[in-house]
């Protein structure tokens, strides 16, 4: 199940790290800044309920979606009472999981409106559709992920390391040139005047200049 979800979410341009037990999950949560956690209650080692309690205790800003076979009303009430932001019982439809995750992200402290705008660029994050001066721009999932991060930064400089951390996953090679290549194709597809700029030795940012 974890592998299927990992593949499916990455196809939706969502960077994914997988932890197969509660201890590994907590270890990652202390190292990486996640937007959301899809949490199985029946994790081996540290139980999923305890993972949820510790996320709340640590005051982490990530949202928690419990995904579990325990689907009775009492189970849902208990899970939400532990601090989960949403609860989805198995079996489930994958598009619903994606929709719930995107909804949680929109409610996060750093969230913006579902439609992001910058100059003549508009990005409908719900439909994953980008328009430049009213013309649709077709982008790959990874290009969409990078563009969304840049638009949410609203002109702020994002380092290649930050983009790699957010748009790829924990196993991405820190020395890879993947970010540079994606930015290059993104610039080409968005056209002129250029919107994506490079801050030398710092990263990338959006500007109309």
Image: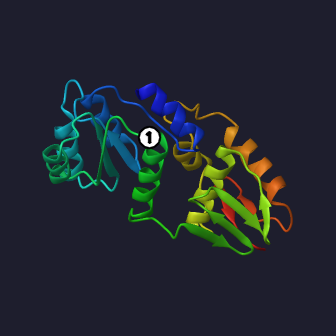
> Is residue 24 shown left or right of residue 49?
right
Q: x%, y% of residue 142?
A: 65, 44
> Is residue 193 shown left or right of residue 77?
right
Q: Write the residue at 38% across / 49% down.
A: 36
Q: x%, y% of residue 177?
A: 70, 37
129 w.r.t. 47: above or below: below
Q: Is residue 205 visible?
A: yes
Closest to the observer, 21 or 71: 71
User: Which part of the image, by quadrant, shows the N terminus?
Assistant: top left
Closest to the observer, 168 or 32: 168
Q: Estimate how packed mark 1 is, as few (under 14), some (14 to 19) or many (20 or more) residues with alpha carbons within 10 Å.
A: few
Closest to the observer, 102 or 198: 102
Q: Write the residue at 58% across / 48% down.
A: 163
Q: x%, y% of residue 118?
A: 67, 72
Identify the image's colour scheme: rainbow, by chain, secondary structure or one colour.
Answer: rainbow
Mark 1 element type: loop
Q: Residue furthest right?
A: 192
Q: Quadrant of residue 117?
A: bottom right
> Is residue 203 shown left or right of residue 208?
left
Q: Is residue 207 visible?
A: no
> How many numbered circles are shown?
1
Q: x%, y% of residue 53?
A: 17, 46
Q: Write the residue at 52% across / 47% down.
A: 166
Residue to which mark 1 is pinned: 93
Closest to the observer, 99 or 17: 99
53 w.r.t. 5: above or below: below
């Amino acid at each position: 199940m974890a592998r299927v979800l990992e593949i499916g979410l990455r196809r939706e341009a969502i960077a994914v790290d997988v932890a197969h037990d509660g201890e590994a999950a907590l270890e990652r949560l202390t190292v990486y800044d996640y937007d959301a956690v899809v949490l199985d209650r029946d994790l081996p080692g540290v139980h999923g309920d305890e993972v949820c309690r510790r996320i709340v205790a640590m005051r982490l800003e990530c949202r928690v979606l419990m995904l579990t076979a325990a689907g009775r009303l009492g189970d849902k009430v208990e899970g939400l009472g532990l601090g989960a932001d949403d609860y989805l019982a198995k079996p489930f439809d994958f598009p619903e999981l994606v929709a719930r995750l995107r909804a949680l992200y929109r409610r996060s402290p750093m969230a913006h409106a579902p439609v992001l705008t910058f100059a003549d660029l508009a990005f409908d994050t719900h439909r994953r559709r980008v328009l430049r001066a009213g013309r649709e721009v077709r982008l790959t999932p990874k290009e969409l992920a990078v563009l969304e991060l840049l638009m949410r930064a609203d002109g702020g400089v994002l380092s290649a390391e930050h983009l790699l951390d957010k748009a790829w996953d924990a196993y991405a090679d820190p020395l890879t040139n993947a970010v540079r290549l994606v930015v290059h194709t993104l610039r080409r597809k968005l056209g002129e005047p250029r919107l994506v700029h490079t801050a030398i030795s710092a990263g990338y940012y959006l500007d109309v200049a």
